Amino acid sequence: MAVQRSQGIYLDWNATTPPHPAVLEAMREAGAWAWANPASVHTRGRQARAAVEELREALGEALGVSSRDVVLTSGGTEANNLGLRRASALVTSRLEHPSVVRVAESLEAAGREVRWLPVSPSGRLEPDAVREACQGLPKAAWVAIQAANHETGVIQPIAELAEVVHDAGLRLHVDAVQAFGKVDSGALRLADAIAVASHKIRGPKGIGALAFRGPAPPPLLVGGSQERGLRPGTVDAVAAAGFHAALRLARTGPSRWARLGALRDEFERAFVTHATPNASEPRLPHVSSLSFTGVNGDELVAALDLLGVQVSSGSACAAGTAEPSPVILAMLGRERARSAVRVSLGEDTSAEELREAKGLFFRALGAAEPEGSRSA
């Protein structure tokens, strides 16, 4: 679904993806028969329940767990919270999404041991550092690591890290919200818990999942028996139908998203004298984090929005705060973090849109666009 040009050039796909036409159609159709409460035992309730269970089966198959061990949530944030609140001790890093970092900080404040991994300028976690951090922790401890970073796109070596974590007798939680459906997800099957979100793969907002192996996590909420009592509350069967449609599209997602690597690299080359990339390979093919010399990232984002280009200066969940990107801060320091801008392309982003966006970037920067960039 092409984004209407009257609404500007949308380059913030890491914040959310526009729902795919197939998803909207699936939800429109489901709205006619799946609107009842899935917990009701009558005919209409059973119809709604069928949409929920079909999604659960598909998620279990995609993530390599029993469908019984898939809990539907409101999104990735709730899935991360549900998966990690039980940790007797936790190993993680400041590179993680706020829904992991804040859980770690709350566990620390409650007196549980939290070990923060060292962060290198590359943004990639080292297996040896994870191995060292795991030493001496109780068997009920967890390690929480993103499959791919939400700001830089850096891909973590999940297979290697899973081996290290399991050798230490600990359990691995993977936040796969940004990676799932965009790169090969085979390594996710090595994790003990996995968080995913529908709206990052062209599905609707307000629905995600935690898939787990082994003992179930304790619920964050009480008051109902839905989702095995792990997540009480009425499940939206229409949203489940949309998530299921997005999941079907995600099977071929990695090949479709891979083409964006060349467009992303071309975009970055245009700013070689004005900005410094905050990450290199390996990373998601559609994400570019750039720090513009002498420029405040938030101000550049605002200027670009006025010109019709929509980007961000960091995680949408941290938007509105006065602090610079905590991810870039941990990797490269305050000055780089203060001037960072995230550009995230999508399946529908065209070369023409990027050419136009480059020109508007230079306009916002008050700089002349390089001649070669205009014809690229």
Image (spheres, rainbow, N blue to C red):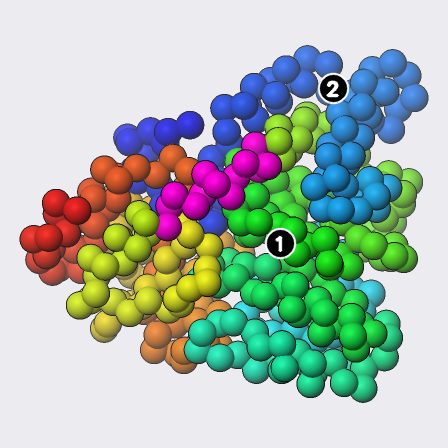
- The amino acid pointed to by label 1 is Ala
For mark 2, does the 10 Å Cα neighbourhood hold few (<14), some (14 to 19), or many (20 or more) residues?
many
Residue 208 lies, with reference to residue 113, above or below; the image says above
Q: How many marks?
A: 2
- State the residue at coordinates (38%, 43%): 259
Query: Residue 237 at x, y = what percent?
Result: 73, 27
Judged from the image, the secondary structure of the residue bearing numbered disc 1 is loop
Which residue: 51% across, 58% down? 150
Q: Is residue 148 visible?
A: yes
Point out which mark residue 187 bears: none
Determine the residue positioned at 33% across, 29% down: 4
Work out whether mark 2 precedes mark 1 in sequence or the reverse, and give the earlier one. Answer: 2
Q: Is residue 254 magenta?
A: yes
Could you tell me residue 271's position as x and y percent?
Answer: 21, 61
Q: Quadrant of residue 73?
A: top right
Q: Which residue is rendered at x = 75% and y = 39% of the image?
A: 61
Pinpoint residue 200: horizontal percent, then vertical percent. 54, 44
Q: Which residues are magenta?
A: 249-261
Whether the magenta-drawn stretch holds residue 232 is answered as no
Which residue position holds label 2? 34
The quadrant holding residue 41 is top right
The front one of 219 and 166 is 166
Mark 2 secondary-structure assignment: loop
Label 1 belongs to which residue? 176
Residue 267: x, y in percent? Answer: 26, 53
**Circle nearer the viewer, 2 or 1:** 1
Alpha-carbon span between mark 2 and mark 1: 28 Å
